[in-house]
């Protein structure tokens, strides 16, 4: 168990990629602080981890709310004594062409996808600096690298996460804290399930491996970056996209 003795905070842990990350990190021995808005789904996740012999606790946090982030992380630190690993995964979409996009939809996506990552890092970094060990993994997106029509807010937020990753990597490297990002391609989640069948078929044709990825594919990459095996990797964006974007 590569992560035995570590405590991992995962945002957006109630479903999709965050849920898979929490389960995978727990299987590797990490204690999980699971954060999301949905208490019922969080409780189910905690029960599943406990049933498999792991340890976890639920923290109801809307990452668009700075006060909830501060109080939730404070509770997690009080319960577990430290946070070794932070997975900034929580994210939303509010798709629209820029000419029709409401300012509220721009702000909601930037606050949830990007500002929340900065705020979560700010709350956990003291614990990592104190122990001179930490792993921060930001979940970005292939669309933060290529852009996507109708997703200016989402693409901007995910591109911003890449910049945040590199800046933070430089800030804390001397304290043995690594900061990396995972950029998923087309992954089968509730977010992509809402897309039309025509869009999905077009997307698959652009993937050299010819298949849609799973949340577990992303979780495996996160576990690697969170482990000592990746101790000499920082400021890196790990593409997990089936070859959809190369280079």
Image (cartoon, rainbow, N blue to C red):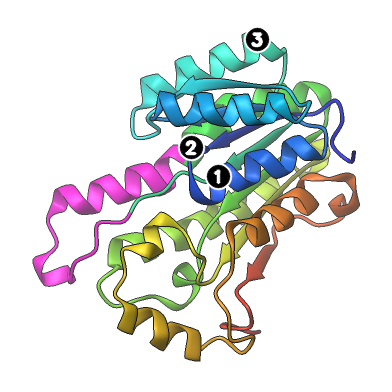
Mark pair 2, 3: CA separation: 20 Å
- Residue 97: name its quadrant: bottom left
At x 38%, y 26%, the residue is 66
Q: Which residue is mark 3?
A: 79
Q: Position of residue 141 (x, y in %)?
A: 50, 64
Q: Position of residue 49 (x, y in %)?
A: 68, 30
- Image quarter of the C terminus: bottom right
Q: Secondary structure at mark 2?
A: loop
Q: Are marks 1 and 2 in contact (CB under 8 Å)?
A: yes
**Which of the labelled discs sits on residue 103, or is there none?**
none
Q: Position of residue 125 (x, y in %)?
A: 65, 29
Q: Secondary structure at mark 3?
A: helix
- Image quarter of the N terminus: top right
Q: Nearer the viewer, mark 2 or mark 3?
A: 2
Q: Which residue is mark 2?
A: 14
- Is the residue marked by circle 1 packed among few (<14), some (14-19), or many (20+) residues within 10 Å? many
- Is the residue marked by circle 2 packed among few (<14), some (14-19), or many (20+) residues within 10 Å? many
Read off the magenta span.
93-116
Q: Is residue 79 magenta?
A: no
Q: Which residue is mark 1?
A: 18
At x 63%, y 79%, the residue is 242
């Amino acid at each position: 168990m590569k992560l035995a003795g570590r405590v991992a905070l995962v945002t957006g842990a109630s479903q999709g990629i965050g849920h898979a990350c929490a389960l995978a990190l727990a299987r590797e021995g990490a204690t999980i602080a699971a954060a999301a808005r949905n208490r019922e789904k969080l409780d189910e996740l905690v029960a599943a981890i406990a049933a498999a012999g792991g340890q976890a606790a639920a923290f109801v946090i809307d990452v668009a709310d700075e006060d909830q982030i501060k109080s939730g992380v404070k509770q997690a630190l009080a319960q577990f004594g430290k946070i070794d690993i932070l997975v900034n995964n929580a994210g939303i979409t509010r798709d629209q062409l820029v000419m029709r996009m409401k300012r509220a939809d721009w702000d909601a996506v930037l606050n949830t996808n990007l500002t929340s990552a900065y705020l979560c890092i700010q709350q956990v970094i003291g614990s990592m600096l104190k122990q001179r060990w930490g792993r921060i993994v930001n979940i970005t997106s292939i669309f933060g690298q290529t852009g996507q029509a109708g997703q200016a807010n989402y693409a901007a937020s995910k591109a911003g996460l890449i910049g945040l990753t590199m800046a933070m990597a430089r800030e804390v490297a001397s304290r043995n804290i690594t900061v990396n990002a995972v950029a998923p391609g087309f992954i089968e989640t509730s977010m992509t399930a809402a897309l039309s069948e025509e869009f999905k078929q077009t997307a698959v044709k652009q993937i050299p491996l010819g298949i849609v990825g799973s949340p577990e594919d992303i979780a495996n990459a996160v576990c690697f970056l969170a482990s000592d095996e990746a101790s000499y990797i920082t400021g890196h964006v790990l593409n997990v996209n089936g070859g959809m974007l190369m280079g």
